Image (spheres, helix red, strand yellow):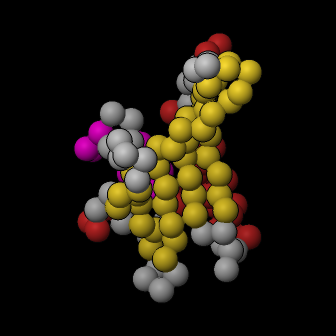
């Protein structure tokens, strides 16, 4: 079941604030950009950059993912490891709001998201 219209509006507002803070400068966005998408109850954050062997092709490199667990009423946050596998960021790092999700990713205490 997808998020409610109200929750989607909250996501859009939180995403805009996060992107205003974290997105690269406009002059380099053709070489490195940041984007985010929401599908059903899953939010995914990723880098967008030209493919190394064909710059006309844009590739997405996953950074973070958050899934809303309606039974527990919180967001579980995941990071992508070097083997391209999603790992849960930690049970103590679950968020009750999408704003908290973006805040946890932005703070990046362990360097799991932005190094």
Residue at image x 68%, y 74%?
2
Please tell me which residue lies in front, 62 or 6: 62
On screen, residue 92 versus residue 77, left or right, reads left
Q: Identify whether 38 is placed above or below 72.
A: above
Residue 103 belongs to magenta span: yes
- Which residues fall within the magenta stretch? 101-111
- Rendered-image quadrant of the N terminus: bottom right
Q: Position of residue 25 (x, y in %)?
A: 59, 19
Q: Position of residue 107 (x, y in %)?
A: 35, 43
Q: Position of residue 99 (x, y in %)?
A: 50, 57
Q: Is there any visible trace of residue 63 in the rendered image?
A: yes
Q: Residue furthest bottom?
A: 71
Q: Dividing the picture into quarters, in which one does residue 94 lie? A: bottom left
Q: Identify whether 80 is placed above or below 26.
A: below
Q: Position of residue 28 (x, y in %)?
A: 61, 16
Residue 11 belongs to magenta span: no
Q: Dividing the picture into quarters, in which one does residue 8 lie? A: bottom right
Q: Main secondary structure of the magenta part?
A: helix
Residue at image x 68%, y 19%?
55
Q: Residue furthest top?
A: 27
Residue at image x 61%, y 46%?
36
């Amino acid at each position: 079941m997808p998020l409610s219209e109200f929750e989607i509006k909250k996501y859009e507002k939180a995403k805009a604030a996060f992107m205003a803070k974290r997105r690269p400068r406009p002059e380099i966005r053709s070489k490195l950009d940041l984007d985010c998408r929401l599908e059903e109850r899953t939010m995914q954050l990723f880098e967008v950059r030209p493919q190394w062997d064909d710059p006309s092709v844009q590739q997405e490199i996953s950074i973070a993912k958050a899934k809303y667990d309606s039974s527990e009423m919180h967001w579980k946050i995941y990071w992508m490891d070097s083997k391209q596998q999603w790992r849960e960021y930690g049970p103590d790092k679950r968020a009750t709001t999408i704003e908290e999700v973006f805040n946890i990713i932005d703070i990046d205490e362990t360097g799991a998201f932005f190094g």
